[in-house]
Structures are given as structure tokens and as C-alpha cells.
Image: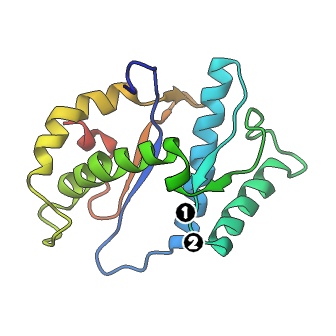
Amino acid sequence: MLQGHGVRLIARIWIKALGQPFNGKSVYTSSIQGLYTYFDQFLANEGTFGFCIADSRDHLKNVNVAHSVFTQKFRASSTVYTRILELPTFGHSENHAGIQICDIICSALLYPIAAEAYCTGYVANVHVQPGAAALRQRFGPILKAMQFRYQDPLGRWTGGLVVSDGLAQRNASLMFS
């Protein structure tokens, strides 16, 4: 269904380092800013405008994320997020089919593939399922093809599924092989 409608994927995937603190507030905030950057570029490529409906967490976390986008978008020298009309709006997945679809992609594909691909050999718990290798083999090429990637002003490829691997500093290509 998603391929038939030309859906493009962007995501930030974080693999936590063992025994290291993980600042969820800054990670979520920087992730949303990155996703806004990728989405804004997608909208520019399409010659259109858009907005973001994010899965709600709690009021204080939502406010923090919205404020971080606000300070980027409306700073005096800003030229970021010019195609995104509004700060993120927060909804509950039971009320938004689009968020439900994102939840399914994340829960059924991205999370198990990432846990298996990046954590095998480092982490031994219920979250690292060897069977997810079959998901990676079957859906990896599809996920790779559905990414929205582009070249930044310095000519580097960015966007798509971006992985920050705190265990071995590997890039996103492991998600697709």
C-alpha cells in the first residue's frame, strides 16, 4: 500500500551505548529537528508545503519539542523549515491512521531489524531476536528504496533512515543488508 502511494520514509534510529547515560530529552529534540530538516527538503523537492502530526507523549515533552522547533524556525537568521507551515501538532495514535501506520512500520520492521542488526553480539535480551534477520532480508531492500534521501549543500547524502550506533558506530546500511 505504501509503495503504491509513493510514500517516502525518514527516521532517526538510536542504538544506545552500553553503560553510558542516554539523555532522552536531547535525543528526542534533536531527532525531531533532524526529521523536520529532512521533511522540509522533501517538501521543497515536491514544490509544496506541509505540517507534522507527531505521536503525543506527555504535555511537558511535547512542549519541549515544539519549543525547540519554534526556536529554530523563528530565530532572526533562520532559513530552516520554510516549507513546514506549523510547529509539530501532537495526536494520539488511536485517533490518527497515519500515526498508526508509522507505529506499525516502527514496531514491526524498524525496531526489530535495528535491534537484531546492531545489537547482536553486544546485547543478549528479549529485544534482540535472531528471527528479525528474516525481516531485514525480506524488507531491507524495500525500506532502502522507500527512503527520502538527498544531498546537503556540501554534497553529502542525508535523510532517509539515519542510524546513530552507540555500540560500534556503524551506519544505516546495516538495516538493509
Residue 101 placed where, x, y %? 42, 42
Farthest-out residue, right: 76
Q: Where, by quadrant of the figure, is residue 69 drawn?
A: bottom right
Height in image: 18 above or below 3?
below
Please give the residue where the numbered disc 2 appears in the rendered image.
25
Residue 164 placed where, x, y %? 39, 55
Residue at left 46%, top 27%? 7
Q: Where, by quadrant of the figure, is residue 49 drawn?
A: top right
Label 2 Cα crowd, 10 Å radius (few <14 / some 14-19 / many 20+): few
The dot on residue 28 is 1
Label 1, secondary structure: give it.
helix
| Viewer can see residue 138 | yes
Residue 68 placed where, x, y %? 72, 60
Instruction: State if disc 2 and disc 1 touch (CB < 8 Å).
Output: yes
Q: Where, by quadrant of the figure, is residue 138 drawn?
A: top left
Label 1 Cα crowd, 10 Å radius (few <14 / some 14-19 / many 20+): some
Answer with left or right where residue 121 lies relative to residue 169: left
